[in-house]
Image (spheres, rainbow, N blue to C red):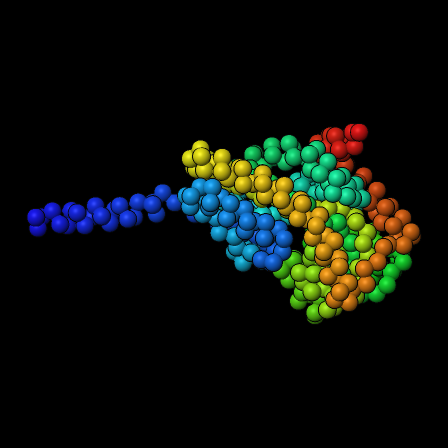
Amino acid sequence: MRVRLPLLACLFSAALAAPAWAQTRWDLPAAYPASNFHTENLTQFAADVDRATAGKLKITVHANASLFKAPEIKRAVQGGQAQIGEILLVNYQNEWQIFGADGLPFLADSYDESAKLYKAQKPVLEKKLAEQGMMLLYAVAWPPQGIYVKKPINSAADLKGVKWRAYSPATSRIAELVNAQPVTVQAAELSQAMATGVIESYMSSGSTGYDTKTYEHIKYFYDTQAWLPKNAVLVNKAAFDALDKPTQAALLKAGAEAEARGWALSKSKNTEYLELLKKNGMNVLPPSAQLKADLKKVGDTMLQEWLQKAGPEGQAIVDAYRKP
């Protein structure tokens, strides 16, 4: 009996440890605060995966660039340092022009148009990401982008020399075309940049304005509805392939649900955020006819420049998007 006791103890320990061996843990780096609707959607997605797989796949969301900074997330997923991650597609336009399609001013300037552009862009995105060892799990549009600025503006000329936050090639180019002064600032550093006077203006959604308490530093928001950039959730293909089939199916289903929920959330939050900005002292204004015309010219210039760089691939996306 004495001889058997250690054996029984070992077997008992092994039985207790068995579920832990079967569990897979993934890290999901994200660039935005935990209170942002994209991050809330990610948290819900992770909970859905946990529930659907009975705890077999656990995804930990690392919000506010706490695991990797925004520009590092794609490489982290590609290299397997993180199994899954959320990126802002337009940030990677210099790597491949198609990533910047939804950052072109006034190409797609409503939720319906943005969804149509995504449909045209998606097959090409999926192909490119597959070549890089990744999968596109889902994508969700930000609310329409407007201009935050410290002073009233009536035309693009009023932005001359203004210190303008640039976070993507497109936002840098807009600054150049309106003669503003571009300063690279990522989302996690935006509040500090405003507080210290590093920037005086930027283009983003009502969501970013509220999250960063922009109203404490900047008092004007012009609702130009210029574009609706998308956040995309990418998965490392090798990590996905290592999951069993039921877990893969649960992940894909939760991703599809997060995409539908995220777009609906973005729409409802847009109205909510603009009201919250007003409540906190922000002047939320429509752009003047002159400002709208000036920005339309900027958009036309940028689309032509983008098409030259993006080549036949870019032209095919724009043609598919514009097809009635």
In the image, 130 versus 110, the foreground residue is: 110
Residue located 69% across and 52% down the image:
269
Q: Position of residue 18 (x, y in %)?
A: 30, 45
Is residue 34 visible in the rendered image? The answer is yes
Picture residue at 73% right of the left edge, 46% below the top: 228
Residue at image position (92%, 52%) is 290
- Closest to the observer: 125 or 250? 250
Given residues 2 and 287, the one toward you in this image is 2
Q: 1 above or below 66?
A: above
Determine if residue 238 is in view. Answer: no
Viewer-nearest residue: 265 or 63: 265
- Residue occupying image coordinates x 66% and y 67%: 192
Give left or right: position of 277 versus 233.
right
Residue 114 percent across, percent down from the top left: 73, 40
Q: Quadrant of the C terminus?
A: top right
In the displayed structure image, the side of residue 5 where residue 34 appears, left or right: right
Q: Is residue 77 above or below residue 184?
A: above
Tell me if 304 is positioned left or right of 28 in this view.
right
Give the number of callouts.
0
Relative image position of residue 83 (x, y in whole percent)? 49, 45
- x then y, percent, for residue 200: 77, 64
Q: Farthest residue toward the right? A: 290
